[in-house]
Image (cartoon, grey):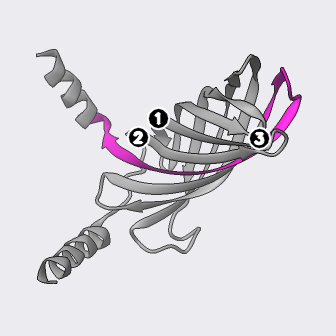
Amino acid sequence: MKKLLIFAVVLTTMALGAQAQTQKGYYLIGGSLATIGGNTNERSFSMNITPKAAWFIQDNLALGGEVSLGLKAGRAQSPSFNYFVGPLARYYFGHDEVNTPKQTRAFAEANAGVSGANGGGKSTNGFGAGIGPGVAFFVNQNIALEALAKANIITGAGNNGVAFAPELSLGFQIFLPSSKLKAIRDDMKK
């Protein structure tokens, strides 16, 4: 019980002292480890892993890219491999814009790119885009756990012309200043 109490005090202290590092010049590196989604047209379910990287071009606005790889299964169909590759934009709202506790930040994310699903003798490849709100909980100054709910639209050639695919993702992000990444790169060169 004593260890649990000490752990709770340490975690609370870290959380209260955390401040989001979303200013110009920082990098965002991480991704979603568990993305659960569906496709309303195909009545399918997917599970993806989505690494992301972005650079804050101004305070609270990051631009970058993401790659999503996963498996999709549905009623009366063979499992298939699905993917997405494309740019992303993420905007973090300030505490004055959205009333949140100090260690959390609300954000909105949008992406667009090449998307598809291949397997079981069928394939659908085309354009995918998504947008949605999220919340990041900063466990310290540089690491955030996050949840993101997105609405995705997929269009293209193949079995479906247009499909709506909602998703919920859980993941983490690491926020690093460009000087820290430069130091890491220089150490790797040695």
For discs 3 and 2, the disc positioned in front in the rendered view: 3
- Residue that lies at the very extreme toward the right in this rendered image: 161
Residue 120, horizontal then vertical, whole percent:
71, 21
Q: Is mark 2 on a helix, strand or loop?
A: strand
**Where is residue 93 shown, x and y percent of the image?**
55, 60
Residue located beneath label 2 in the image: 30
Secondary structure of residue under mark 3 = loop
Q: Is residue 15 left or right of residue 89?
A: left
In magenta, the rendered stretch is 154-179
**Observer-nearest of 23 and 144:** 144
Dot 1 amino acid type: Pro
Q: What distance separates the C-alpha of mark 1 from that of mark 2?
A: 6 Å
Magenta portion: prevailing SS class: strand
Answer few, some or many: residues within 10 Å of disc 1's Cα (few below 14, many 20 plus, some between 14 and 19): some
Question: What residue is rendered at 21% in x and 78% in y?
Answer: 9
User: Hey, which quadrant is residue 101 in on the image?
Assistant: bottom left
Q: Quadrant of residue 157?
A: top right
**Within the magenta stretch, is there residue 177?**
yes
- For the point 85% across and 25% down, the residue is 159
43 is higher (above) or lower (below) than 78:
below
Label drawn at residue 104:
none
The label shown at residue 75 is: 3
Q: Which residue is drawn at 24% across and 28% down?
A: 182
Mark 1 or 3, closer to the camera:
3
Instruction: Name above or below for residue 78 compared with residue 165.
Output: above
Question: What residue type is disc 2 on?
Answer: Gly
- CA distance for labels 3 and 2: 32 Å
Residue designated by label 1 = 51
